[in-house]
Image (cartoon, rainbow, N blue to C red):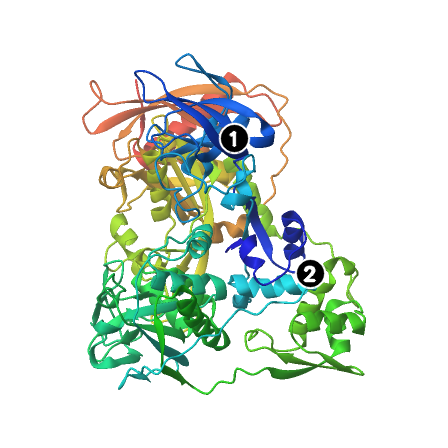
Amino acid sequence: MLVPLSWLKDYVDIDIEPKELEKKLFSCGFEVEESWEVGKDISKVVVGQVETCEAIPDTHLHACTVNAGVHGTFKVVCGADNVQTGGKYPLALDGATVIETAKDHVTVVGVATIKKGKLRGYDSEGMLCSGVELGVTEDMYEGAGYNGLLVFPEDTEVGADVKPILGLDDWIFDVSITANRPDCQSIYGLAREVAAVLEKPLKEPDLSYTEDDTENEGFTVSVEAPDLCPRYIAHYVHDVKIGQSPRWMRRRLALVGNNSISNMVDITNYIMREFGQPMHAFDGSFLEGNKIVVRRANDGEKIVTLDEKEFTLKNDNLVICDGVKPVALAGIMGGLNSEIRDTTTAVTFECAKFARDNIRKSSRALGQSSDSSAAFSKGVYEYTTVMAMKRALHLVEELGCGKISKTHVDVNTGNSLEKKEMKASIKKVNGVLGITVPDEDIVRILTNLNFEPVVNGDELTIKVPAYREDMEDYPDIAEEVIRMYGYDHVHGTFLEGAAVTMGGRNQKQKAELRIKRALCAQGANECMHYSFFSPSDLNLLGYADDAKEREVVKILNPINEDLSVMRTTLAAQMIHAISRNQKKGTLEGRLYEVGNRFFPKSLPLTDYPDEKVTLCIGIFGQDEDFYTLKGLCDNVADTLHVSFKYEAGNKPFLHPYRTAKILCDGVEVGYLGQITYEIQDAEDMRVPAYVAELDLDALSKYYENVPAFVPLSKFDKQKRDLALIMDKTTTCGEVEEAIYSSCKYVTDVKLFDVYEGLPIPPTKKSMAFTITFTPKDEELTDEVISGYVDKMLRKLQFTMGIELRS
């Protein structure tokens, strides 16, 4: 939330520096994410008066002599069309900093430092500035929007710093408000806290206004959904004169990020920022039936909002209607059919409290958000609703943009706006804090926070204002006390009966960390995605209708359709991540993610779903292939001290001839393969991509595996090369497994050649392997190794029909 210091000063006499105020806010629980001076990029700019102004021949430039008061008189070359003798303008002195603009003198491109120099042979010792070059808009200062010099009034002091004149000496605080303090989502709400922490009196806003005898006869308000709208206030304003708001209001709105639209609309935006209360103004001439009805929408009912978007509504959406049609999405945005126009002469102000959960759900479901929906989603109190309407009517009278009738309707459920009494034990309050706060400090703090405390022995009685609905019991009182008393009073001690524990990671965490480190060592980067994805992702992957992955857990209140079901595979999000990287010009990379997949035990849900911890690996690039991904999977196996076996597999989203299932001790634990060309094209990939998934839950039984120590052989290893002829359907893995099992001294089998063609029969292929024999207790002679090879060949021929190539 953006908070101008000058606006805060309307309600509190702040006599400390902005940075000190920032620390004070932080100390009482409000983080200032950023603070800056409005004119932070402007320096050494003063008011200058042009004493002489002569045109430079054959140019649009003028050679001027500018009086800067105590700073001296300077020669300045100026190209603005409104420079003239006697005029007072901003003068940037030598070494000044101003906003740098492009050639159009409007587009901001950075910050420039002014230096002395020559233009067309004339000395120029500074620069006369426009409003844009000082970071000032038309809303902030009259005339600043003109594409020429900013003109000061005749009575402006020559040589004065322009910052106070233009309001550039103001400060903006970007304050982070926690979800439990919606009462502070406004300038006035935060001013209450500033007053408390500075122990200064809080100035009350002017809520006075004068009603005339005019009445909007027959006007009615009915609330058909009081559970969703416990309070609705409407007030009729007539003889409305639509025009521009005064500069002080436009400036304040500009500082908090609002554009000025017209006086009546600006008032509602001003109230939103000042009190955190969303308001709406209806053009009275477009309210058919002279009535307002607050109700649930009819299924299929439509509305076009102010931003010209059409929405089809459901029964759980709340709408504001006139006697015929919806004219606003309650708490979200007004309707286009009742907006304030230049021709508006009568306005009905709306100020209401809506149920926060309903506004939040409607905003998400419709994909329509606004400042109003954000405020209602966090919480708006009826106390503020009443105050905000009075303040809005006061501003109408102050701005002279309308007359206030006596037609005022307040429909509510009878909730009291008076303070509620709460009692608590001081001993319990101190027990929460772990320290003893003196009674006089507790009374002082709670008095500053407007709780009217009374202490009677151990009993503390406070009166809770209607805007503090978060106050429920003594722990809340303890929080209020300590944030003002100071967290530095709390010293670290053990809880009673506490003991030191060893701590550390469990076996699962250790194993997963080893896997992550092993993948990182191979150049892979960890990524993280949401635990939910879109049903369209399953369509992208081509899963059949009866596939297990189609049995998904649906989210009741999804953020949007793309995040509406719990994921049953990590592959879809990995494919999207690879695609995003390639679209941004990253054409090679290795990624991995450890996350959960969710499988319901039954549908509809009657119990929590099964969660399977899964490792997903994705690689892409011209130098990556099936075997580099297989190498990463083997690296995972080595980390767990197991071995994987690979067999031909099938996945609808993977290349049919470059896909394998992964087995460990005969149990399938995952798959790997190349993403199909169709999906690569659909995702706009420019280089090949590969993906693998491993079920870490299935591999968790190996987490405690430890490597067995095997002493190095004292004897030399022996190698033999064998070229074998076999059926084309025989896989390399099957041959390797058969070779290993034929002799206990075989420690390594590597394929180094595959050949098909004459003189080998068409149904056959040749595969050549290097086989390593490692002696254990004695040296293996050539004769002994030849015997092992003969035995190996006989087994291969008998079991698999494999023969030695001649």
What type is the residue that disc 1 sits on? Thr
Q: Position of residue 539 (x, y in %)?
A: 25, 52
In this picture, residue 544 sits left or right of residue 54: left
Position above or below: 181 against 64: below
Q: Residues within 10 Å of mark 2 (few under 14, many from 20)?
A: some
In this picture, residue 93 sits left or right of residue 194: left
Mark 1 or mark 2: whose residue is earlier in sequence: 1
Q: Which residue is mark 2?
A: 198
In percent of the image, x 63 and y 84: which residue is there?
421
In this picture, residue 270 sits left or right of residue 26: left
| Viewer-closest of 243 and 256 | 243
**Of circles 1 and 2, which is in front?**
1
Q: Position of residue 524 (x, y in %)?
A: 47, 35
| Viewer-closest of 724 and 536 | 536
Mark 2 lies on a secondary structure that is helix
Res. 267 mark: none
What type is the residue that disc 2 sits on? Leu
Q: Quadrant of residue 396?
A: bottom left
Q: Which residue is mark 1?
A: 97
Q: Position of residue 607 (x, y in %)?
A: 43, 71
In percent of the image, x 59 and y 21: which residue is there?
779
In percent of the image, x 52 and y 28: which residue is there?
67
Mark 1 lies on a secondary structure that is strand
* Image quarter in which the C terminus is found: top left
**Marks 1/2: CA distance?**
35 Å
Q: Position of residue 178 (x, y in %)?
A: 55, 61
Q: Report the residue that reaches farthest toward the top.
A: 121
Q: Residues within 10 Å of mark 1 (few under 14, many from 20)?
A: many
Position above or below: 322 against 743: below
Position above or below: 612 against 710: below
